[in-house]
Amino acid sequence: MPDIRWSGRVIVGAIALGTVVYLMMVLGPLAELEQITGSKPFDLRPGGYSHDSARDLINALGQEGSRIYLWRQIPLDTVYPALFAISVAGSINWLSGRFAAPFRRWFRAAATAAYFAAFADYVENAMIVAMLTTGSDLSPSLTQIASAATIFKSVLTTLSVVALLLAAILSFAVKLKRSGNPD
C-alpha cells in the first residue's frame, strides 16, 4: 500500500507547480499571442478551429508571434499536461479512497481521463508546432488533426475536472457522515 503522506505531498506539489505553470502560460505567452493577433491562440479554442481560421491565426502571428508560440508557450505547455494529469488523477484517486468499492472503481476509471487529456494536449502541441513551421501553406488534414486534438483535450479535461469535483463533494459527504455516526 502506498504511503499516503508521500502521495499527498506529490499531489500537492504537482498542484502547486501546475498552477504556477498555468498562470505563467495564461498571463505570459498566451496573453501576448492574443494581443498580437486579436484572437484566441489554438490552445484556448475548446471548440477547435477551421482550416481558414488556423491559416488566419498563423498569418496574424507573423514571425514574432510564431517565435513566442514556439519558444515560450510550447515549452511551458510541455510541462503542464503531466502536472495536470498527476494533480487531477492523483487527487481523484486519493479522494476516492474512502468510497465503497463500486464508487472507488468508477472514480479511479474516471481519473484516467486526466491522462488522456494530457496525451491529447501533447498531440495538440505537436500539431501546433507542425502548423507553425509549415506556415500559411498548411494542409487541411494537419489542421483537422490539430483541431481534433484540441477538442479531445478540452472534453477530457472537462470530464476529469467534473470527476474531481464530484469526488471532492462525495469525499466531504462521507467524512461528514462518518464523523456524525459513532459506529
Image (cartoon, rainbow, N blue to C red):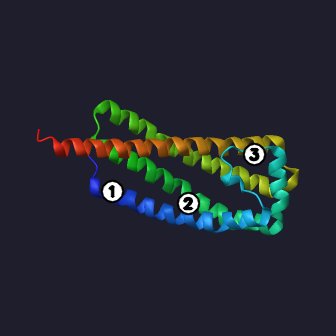
In the image, taking residue 122 as reference, residue 174 lies left or right, namely: left
Which residue is under mark 1? Answer: 8
Report the amino acid beneath label 1. Gly
Identify the image quadrant of residue 151: top right
Is residue 116 in view from this perspective? no
Query: Could you say whether the residue bearing mark 1 is in a helix, strand or loop?
Result: helix
Query: Could you say whether the residue bearing mark 3 is in a helix, strand or loop?
Result: loop
The mark nearer the N terminus, 3 or 1, is: 1
Report the amino acid beneath label 2. Val
Label for residue 79?
Answer: 2
- Disc 3 to disc 1, how far (Cα)? 38 Å
In the image, taking residue 174 as reference, residue 37 lies left or right, namely: right
The mark nearer the N terminus, 2 or 3, is: 3
| Residue located farthest toward the front when viewing the structure as drawn | 180
Identify the image quadrant of residue 155: top right
* Camera-side mark, 1 or 2: 1
- The residue located at (41%, 62%) in the rendering is 13
Report the amino acid beneath label 3. Tyr
Label for residue 49?
Answer: 3
- The residue located at (38%, 60%) in the rendering is 12
